Every structure is written in structure tokens, then in C-alpha cells.
Image (cartoon, helix red, strand yellow):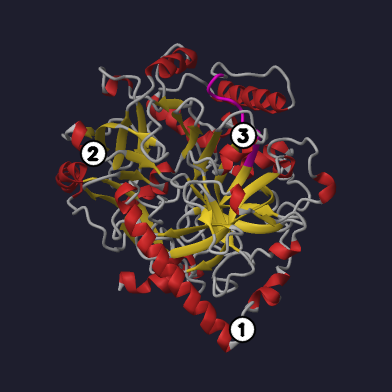
Amino acid sequence: MSFLILSLSSLSLSAQATDKVLTFPLVPHHEIARRRRALTQTNRYTDAEEEERRNEQYQARSMSFFGSTGSTKNDSTEQLAKQVSVIYQGYGTHYVDLWVGTPPQRQTVIIDTGSGVTAFPCATCTHCGVPEYHASRLFQQDDSITFRLLTCDECTGYQTHCDWQGKTCRMEALYGEGSFWYAQQSEDVAYLGGSHYRPVHQDQIGKPVSDLDPTAGAALAMQLQFFCQDFITGLFVPQLADGIMGMDRDSLSWVRQMKKQGKVDREAFSLCFVRAPNILRDGSEAGTISLGGTDTRLHRTPIVYTDRSYVKGGWYGVHIRKVYLREGGGGNYVTPSTNHLKIIPLKIDENAMNTGDIIVDSGTTNTFLHKSIGDALYGQYKEMTGRDWDHDWKTLTLEELDSLPTILLQLRGDDSRNKQVAADFGKQGVVPGLVGQLDPQHPYDVLIAIPPSHYYEYRPDTGKVANRLFADGRGMSILGANSMMGHDILFDLDHNILGWAESTCDYDQLLKRNFDGAYPPQWKEPVEMTWLGGRSHDAVCSGFLCQLSCTTIMVILLFAAHQKFKKRKANVERQLSIVELEMQTPPSFRDSEYS
């Protein structure tokens, strides 16, 4: 999600529509691998060899956490993560749990590689989405004995400033579609992950545990600088997640604060997204986040690297070399599940489709590409399918959806690293994820697949689907969450690269394997969220005069902030069209969009 724009909702769910949920049969990974080998004969491992290889990889990965000598051939790049935690899916974007304060209070925050600060509503925030929409209660800062506001002398970040009384540090954010928030810069103890329902017991904090243990996050608790929101408007109110966690290159991003405080050895993290079949307010598991590096136990293919992860503004960028359409029916990955499928290169000017930079943005639900891609894509798609490339809601069967083409993006690769990956992979030299003979001039470029099950969004309440890959932009392009799905993506700030490995992103399987088939105690046991009937319902300012005064003050602040941002507008390069991106919203706020 860029600084001035938030994401468009990707997946709606009506509580009354559970009987219309589209279900997909789950096939074990080893069976998928066996079928693929039988059909393509490109995997150099037998079933037994594959299982042995994965077990050795798992054991080496687990041993290395406790300081053993297990390693991989690309240790300089593939540093192992210090913590692996579950990701949940909201009405579109993906979010994680933060436990903030002493004692810890849960806040759910969108994982956003397109911004750099963490912010969520606090107790002083009125009409801020609780309890109607947000997943957690307002953060009660007075209940935390470790919470403090930063003074004007401690202001950090280029967007912060001293308040009008000259006492505390503040920040305001005005977004392109009109949403706004105002917050105080604060500090408190915080950790990521853990049980979704209860904080880690104080006695467990700081104890060394496996990186997969849900209590591992508490061992990496740090003094987090964040923004305590006391005023939010627009689409910030009806979202499911409480706030946002910035993961770009800003000094206040989560990963940079972890590194600065010595909680991880390097500034690196991995995101692995899937689309949850059902979206529940209580939390729908939809992938993993790995802090401090990557976790090869998640990977079904070797990790390969793109060479350009830095663009203006601190985002993570890629360069698209070519675009292809592959005939439908080939599955969700680069290596198709059936032979003899046509792969058709699109004739596109390389410079044109990279106009304005291309960023990988986890906070944007959909994908937005340059119109030069659309000009070539629309006609070829129509020729292959007999359908127009449109974004209308329509009814498709699973077979019809699967028959649609898969989009293959060829991203400029890091030749030196990818040559080493190819050498390490083995005798056949076929590396899923590298272009290889598809482009003999650039065999070490990276190839990623965006199948129709990813670029189409499904609405269970209507039983309809819509294409959510847009190719009509004229400036910056965005590979959003639907392009990231099915990959464990390494964001390596130290080496200025992105790593890509295909993955099922199955956190449950990792947990079961790590704990011999049994979940850790109390990991998945829900508890009564009693706060829903507690004081978070009550406004801090409930009288008429108080409400009128607060409203007047906030209108003045909003006007002042708007004027301030108008002056900054010429220098802000993170602007996108209002039509292209919106913040995630629940179905009740989106019905008019689809009527």
C-alpha cells in the first residue's frame, strides 16, 4: 500500500452466505509433486529422494536455529529467519497480530511493503471502527505500564512534527481517496505473532524456543515506535484489521527497528500469501511471515533472485523484461501440470511497460500494470479464449476458470546468484522459477506465474468472479497481493534483492511437522473476547458540548493538514489514481460498487 493510497478490497464475505462458499479439494503436496513429475519429467528426484531431501532440509533448518552447523549453499543470501508466524486475511489485504504493551494487548495490522510506519487506533479515538468493524479493541494505552508518548525532542521520521502545545510528537496522513488519520508518536513493548487469542505468559517471554513455536515472537519483543491514532476517517473505519504495519525501507519500519535493537541479524523478511477460502472476523489463516530472512521449509522450488529491489521512495521494485500468456489448464505454478501447452510471448516495448517503476506492494490487493501491456494482452486473450478482458462480475464454473490463460511475467534476474542456484540444483539444470530456454538470451531471469485463480476474485455472497488485474495505467505499476500469492518472497534490504520461491504457504503443515503432529498448548483454542462488551464501546468524550468541540477541532486539523499536504504534493512521488486503489472495506460498504 503506498503512502497516499490504500488497497482495494479483494474478497467479500456475507455472514449469511456461508452456504454459497466455493470449496476446492485439497491435494497433498507429495501427490501434486508426483503428478507433476509424471507429466513433465523435469524433476530429478524420485518420491523417496524428494521426501529424503525435504527431511534433510527440514532437519538442517531446525538445527541451525539452535546454533548447529546446518547450512545451505546460499547462506550469504538465504539467511534463516529468526521467527516464522501465521498471516491472516481480512476483506482483501493480509494482516498479522501485534501484541503491544505490558500486559500485552492484541492489535491486528495490515502487512504493507508500501509504507514505513506502524499505526493503530488508541483509547482516545472516537468512532474508530470498534466494535462494529475492527478485529480487536482499541489499544488502551493507560493500561500499559510501559507505554509513553514521545516528546518533541524525540520526533523521528520526516513526516512527524511537534504539536501546537510544543509537548508531543505528531503525524497526520492524508490519502488520495480522502481518508485521513492523526496520531501521536509513541513507544511501547511489542512483539509479532503468538496465539491469536491470548498473549504469551510473562514467564515465557525471552526464553529460547523453536522459530516456529508461537511463543517465539515474545522472545523478540522490542521497544516499538508507532503512532497512536486518536482520529481516523473514511475507509480506515470499516476495515477488519485495526491498523497498518509498514515494512518498506523507512527507519521506522518494523524490520528496521528489529535490526537496530539486535533482534535479528539482518534487515530481511519473507512474505508467503495464499487466499483464504472463507473470511472470518475471528481470523482466517492465509500464509506466513518470516522475520530476519527466509524459511526454506516452505519452498517447493529453489529460491531465485531479481536484481533491482530499490526504487524511489523506499519501495521494493522489479523490472519486467517480457510477458507471456500460457494456455489454461496448467495449474498454479511455472512448471505446468500438463505437457504441450502453448506459451505465447506478447509484443510489448520493454521501456514502455516499465514506465514509472514497478513495485511489489503487499498492502495493495490487486495488480496494476502499464497500458502497453494491456494493449498487447487484450487482443491475445480474446483470441485464446473468445472472451473480452474485462472486470465485470460474472458466473464461471471451476472448469471454465481453470481453462483461462495463466500470465507469466519475466523479471530481470540477478545473474550471478541465479547461476549459482542453477549449478546447485543438479544435473539436469532445469530450475523452476528461472526462464531458461524460454528466453535463451536471458536464461537467468526469474519467471513467476499468475494463474486465473489468483487474478480472479471470488465473491461467495453472489457466487460470481471478477478479473482483478488491471493493465491500463500510465505511471507506476504495482504487483499486488494477488500477484504475490503462491510464492514465498524474500525482501532483503541488506543485499538489495528480492527472492522468489514457489510455495503452498501452509503454516499448519509447518506447525504439525515441528510439533510431531500436535499443536503447541493453547495455540488454536479460542477464548471469549470479553472486551466486546467492555469499556471500548464507550466514547471517551460522550457529552454534546465535548463532541461538538472535538468535531470543530478535528475539522480545523483536517483543513490544516490538507493545506500542508497540498504544498508537499509536488515532492511526493507515491501517488496513484483514486480509481485504481482503495482501502479494503467489508461487503456492506461495497455493495453499491457492484450494483
- Badge 1, how many Cα within 10 Å: few under 14, some, many 20+? few
What amino acid type should be assigned to the residue bearing mark 2?
Answer: Thr
What amino acid type should be assigned to the residue bearing mark 1?
Answer: Ser
Between residue 553 and residue 398, name the one nearer to us. Answer: 553
Q: Residue at x 46, y 18 (%)?
A: 421
Q: Residue at x 20, y 33 (%)?
A: 351
Between residue 457 and residue 213, name the one nearer to us. Answer: 213
Q: What label does residue 259 carry, if any?
A: 3
First in residue order: circle 1 vs circle 2: 2
Regarding mark 2 in the picture, which secondary structure is present there? loop
Q: Position of residue 469 (x, y in %)?
A: 30, 50
- Report the mark closest to the observer, 1 or 3: 1
First in residue order: circle 1 vs circle 3: 3
Q: What label does residue 542 carry, if any?
A: 1
Q: Position of residue 163 (x, y in %)?
A: 54, 61
Between residue 239 and residue 53, name the one nearer to us. Answer: 239
Magenta region, main secondary structure:
loop
Q: Residue furthest right?
A: 203
Between the C-alphas of marks 1 and 2, the distance is 51 Å
Observer able to see residue 208: yes
Residue 457 lies in the magenta stretch: no
Between residue 165 and residue 198, name the one nearer to us. Answer: 165
Between the C-alphas of marks 3 and 2, the distance is 33 Å
First in residue order: circle 3 vs circle 2: 3
Q: Residue at x 56, y 88 (%)?
A: 544
Where is 251 relative to 363, above or below?
Answer: above
Observer able to see residue 336: no
Pointer 2 residue: 355
Q: Position of residue 535 (x, y in %)?
A: 70, 75
First to last magenta residue range: 76-84
What amino acid type should be assigned to the residue bearing mark 3?
Answer: Lys
